[in-house]
Amino acid sequence: MNFTKTEINVLKTVRKHGLISRAEISRQIGLSKPIVSKIVSQFVSLGALVEKKRGLSSKKGGKKPILLSFVPNFKYIVALDIGGTKMIAALTDLEGKILEKTNFSTKGIKNKEELFSLVETGINSVLQIPKDKVLAISMGVPGTVSSDDQVVHYIPSFDLRNIYLAKEMEKRFGLPVRVANDVTLNALGELWLGAARGSKNMFLLSLGTGTGGAFVINGEVYEGSHGMAGEVGYMITSWPNDQASTNGFGSLESWFSGYSFEKTFGNLTGKKVNLKEFFASHKEDKMFRKVLTKGCEHLAVALGNIITLFDPDVIVITGGIGYNQYETLIELILPTIRKIVPEEIYQRVTFKRALLGELGVVLGAVYHGQTEILL
């Protein structure tokens, strides 16, 4: 589905205002009324716009204008959050309303074909409508992705490199496919429908199997020149004590991540680690408290550097650990931040727990999947 910039501008104007007349669209974007009427008629015939009701007459009287409204279910998005331990697949309308949702385990993925097969299964599990009703398939992955060619360069959780996931799914389904880093999508979701709604400059910190981040600058997600901005898991917080990683995870992640905690306590106890139980008993378990406190100190140093460099108005914390253990983490992080960041800087920054929880990446994918087409 290809629209001109002018056509997309008309659609955006209707979405922004909710209810708007043809004449008002013409005034808003500086197009002649005949051109607006022609474009609107096209979108009405496609089912993207609907004539909702009549508005108020002007002060001069005359015929009441017909108000137009956007139809969020004229097309759908298949959105996937491919995590280090589980995958969420969902079918949503263009405003993020979820119609179908399924969960899958991603543990044990060893090669690209296993990943492709699971993703295909996930898409098929929610694809309960004709393909011509799907605008795009949009996916988030826990790794580095080039925004230009959509190549997934590396997923540490699966130890897979150079994955042409978008190209493969386009071949299998015949639909447009978009892939992005999962934390980038999480930031988009929180900016669109969550805790960062209305924020100008935001940093999102995702704490789960790995540790990642995403920047929002002047209301837009900043991906960098190659789509890899926000890879804070590779930040150095204790040079020269930090060493180059050999397992794909970064130096900061060796101090704080679900992966490092499971590895550390698995080695110490000789048993399989349940992080939820450890967090529940962190105040009584001195060993875990010590490791957690040290990890939070390193996390705070990274955040302190981000605050002084970036000056965000809000920091949103999410991820499996970040979302569920928010209060515990904030209690351990803030004392260090206050020590290393001048008061006049840190007191202007608001910390927030994410609002979207496990659906943050999925909803960000919904937004991302339609950005270049309809938004």
Image: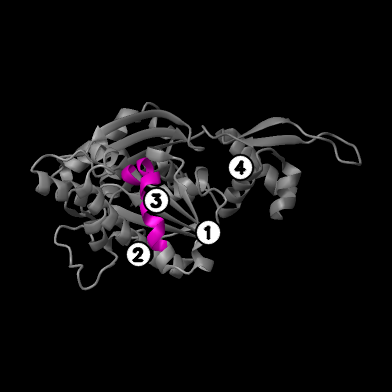
Comparing 78 with 261, the one in front is: 261
Q: Mark 1 points at which residue?
A: 313
Identified at 43% across, 63% down, the residue is 338
- Amino acid type of disc 3? Glu
Q: Choose mark 3 or mark 4, whichever is in front.
A: 3
Q: Which of marks 3 and 4 is nearer the N terminus?
A: 4
Q: Mark 4 points at which residue?
A: 15
Distance from the alpha carbon under mark 3 to that under mark 2? 15 Å
- Amino acid type of disc 1? Asp
Marking on residue 331: 3
Q: Give the range drawn in magenta.
A: 320-337
Q: Choose mark 4 or mark 2, whichever is in front.
A: 2
| 276 sits left or right of 216 in the view | left
Q: Is mark 3 on a helix, strand or loop?
A: helix
Distance from the alpha carbon under mark 2 to that under mark 1? 18 Å
Is residue 239 found inside the magenta-colored segment of the image? no
Tag 4–tag 2 contact (CB < 8 Å): no
Which residue is outermost to the left? 270
Distance from the alpha carbon under mark 4 to that under mark 2? 41 Å
- Amino acid type of disc 2? Val
- Amino acid type of disc 4? Arg
Distance from the alpha carbon under mark 1 to that under mark 3? 20 Å
Q: Is mark 4 on a helix, strand or loop?
A: helix
Q: Name the residue under label 2.
A: 301
Q: What element carries label 1?
A: loop
Q: Earlier in the sequence, mark 3 or mark 2?
A: 2
Identified at 35% across, 50% down, the residue is 206
